[in-house]
Every structure is written in structure tokens, then in C-alpha cells.
Amino acid sequence: MELGSFFLILAVIVITTVYLYAPFTKNTRRALRPRESHEVSTLKAERDRVINSLQELDFDHGLGKIPAEDYPEQRASLLQKGADVLRELDELSPASSSAINAEARIEKATAAGRADTGSNSPVVEDNDEDLESMIAARRKKHKSKSAGFCPKCGRPVLVSDKFCPSCGKAISN
């Protein structure tokens, strides 16, 4: 019986060792990536940095922090850096190249970032009548959803509510 116990313990130790060693073998395979993918990753990070710098430059110029005479020169410099990075990226991965030139691609990415932040979005000039009609439509839409207030706790309730969502009192319609 002692020999069987010894083999069982030995098998458990071997299985545990293999299980614990498996993650180390996966990391060594992942660490042996080609140098080219590292360069692509570096270039993509540089591209993102240039785009962020362009967005910050545009924002600062909009706030008046950057003099008007310095802005075009700084912007052109950043656009040139971004175009160089995109050209290098296209050389490393020709499958992703497009018909649009590099500077236009940087401009497009910068504009997309500005649209997300709303820093350079166009201001719509509406007259008072249009604004009033938009407000009236919004109020009408809001009134159709609201049923008033709970008689017990005073919180707002909707038309579809049978009970107050806050205190649970039955709502009579």
C-alpha cells in the first residue's frame, strides 16, 4: 500500500507542477513577437500623441492662449509629424494604406476628436420663435410622461406607474 500512495503523491505533484508551469510557457511565446509589431505599436502610440497634441493646440488657440502668429506654424509642424508617422505606418503595413494622403488622415482624426469633445462644434443660431417652439414641444413631451407627484412622499411619478417608485404607495389615476 505504501508504494501505491507514493505513486499517487508523485502523480499529484507532477500534475500540479505542469499546471503551475503552463503560464510561464505562454509568456515566453508572447515575448518572442517580431520586432516589426513593436515598431507598429510604437508608431500608433506616436500617432495618437500627435492627434492629442493637435486637439490641445486647437483648443488652446480657441481659448486665446496661443498667439495667432504662432498657431499656424505649430499646427503645420504637428501635421507634418503626424504625416511622417502615418507614412511609416503605411510602409510597415501596406495592407492598411488608403487613397487619402497622410495629412488629410491626421486632419480627419483631429476633427473627429473635436466632435467628441464639442470644443469646435458649430454654434447654431436660432431665433427666439424656434427656441420657444422647441421648448414647448419638449414640455409637451414631458407632460405626457409625467403623472404628477406621489401624495405620500412628493416624488415625481410617471403615467405608467401603479405604485410610487420611492415609497411604494399605490397611485390612483
Image (cartoon, rainbow, N blue to C red):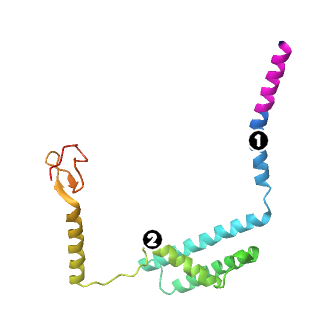
Q: Is residue 3 magenta?
A: yes
The picture quadrant where one finds residue 37 is bottom right
Of residues 102 and 135, which is closer to you in this image? 135
Residue 172 rendering spot, x and y as whole percentages:
15, 50
Residue at 80 percent of width and 62 percent of height? 34
Q: Is residue 160 left or right of residue 121?
A: left
Q: Residue at point 24% right, 79% down?
A: 131
In front here: 151 or 83? 151
State whether residue 119 is above or below residue 32: below
Q: Is residue 62 left or right of residue 140?
A: right
Magenta run includes residue 92: no
Tag 1 residue:
22
Q: Looking at the image, can residue 73 be seen? A: yes
**Relative to 86, is 146 above or below?**
above
Quarter of the picture containing the N terminus is: top right
Asked whether residue 70 appears in the rendered view, the answer is no
Q: Where does residue 124 sit, x and y in percent of width and height? A: 34, 82
Magenta stretch bounds: 2-16
- Front position in the image: 98 or 24: 98
Instruction: In the rendered structure, find residue 117 and report the number of the disc placed on it.
Output: 2
